[in-house]
Image (tube, rainbow, N blue to C red):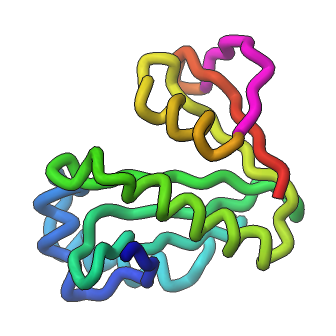
Amino acid sequence: MISLRHFLETDAELLQANQLYNKSKEDILSLIHEWKTKSYNGKYFEIFAVVNNTTVVGSISLYEHSPSIASIGVEIFADQRCHGYAADAMRLLLTYAKGKGYRIIQQQVRTDNLPSIKLHEKLGFETDGYVYVNRKGHDIILFLKTL
């Protein structure tokens, strides 16, 4: 059963081994402390550990774009993929986002990320079908979901 919780200092080595490869343990501990502020660039931001029973299998975040629009970022650790954890975590966070008052979830998905495209379609996100170029120069599809 998937659940969400905030990251703990004891998760630093796990994050370093699975997601934040190029960061020192001290840098990761600093990030965990920063995540507790629930703010990034002056906007609401919250990040959670995705937990299967008692094992952390990834992370998921909620970032505010405006008082009614937010985005979700999910990353399941490579050795934990293909078990449905991303879909379960996103369902939990969509409910959480609705409870926080957000009405629209906006997602940018790279056109070469077929698993993410399928995940968003499965969860009922809609797209206009156009391919956009994001700030990093990547081709993306914009997905939207009303809550």
Residue 55 x/y as whole percent: 21, 77
Q: Is residue 39 magenta?
A: no
Q: In the rendered image, is residue 49 in sight?
A: no
Residue placed at 51% from the left, 18% from the top?
Answer: 111
Horizontal side of 51 relative to 115 (left or right) equals left
Query: Of residues 23 and 94, which is closer to you in this image?
Result: 94
Q: In the rendered image, is residue 71 in sight?
A: yes
Horizontal side of 119 relative to 28 (left or right) equals right
Residue 18 x/y as whole percent: 17, 57
Residue placed at 36% from the left, 78% from the top?
Answer: 32
Q: Is residue 34 above or below residue 146?
A: below
Q: Which residues are magenta?
A: 125-134
Quadrant where the N terminus is found in the figure: bottom left
Q: Is residue 17 above or below residue 123?
A: below
Residue 64 x/y as whole percent: 73, 60
Residue placed at 30% from the left, 53% from the top?
Answer: 83
Q: Is residue 85 above or below residue 111?
A: below
Query: Of residues 77 and 29, which is closer to you in this image?
Result: 77
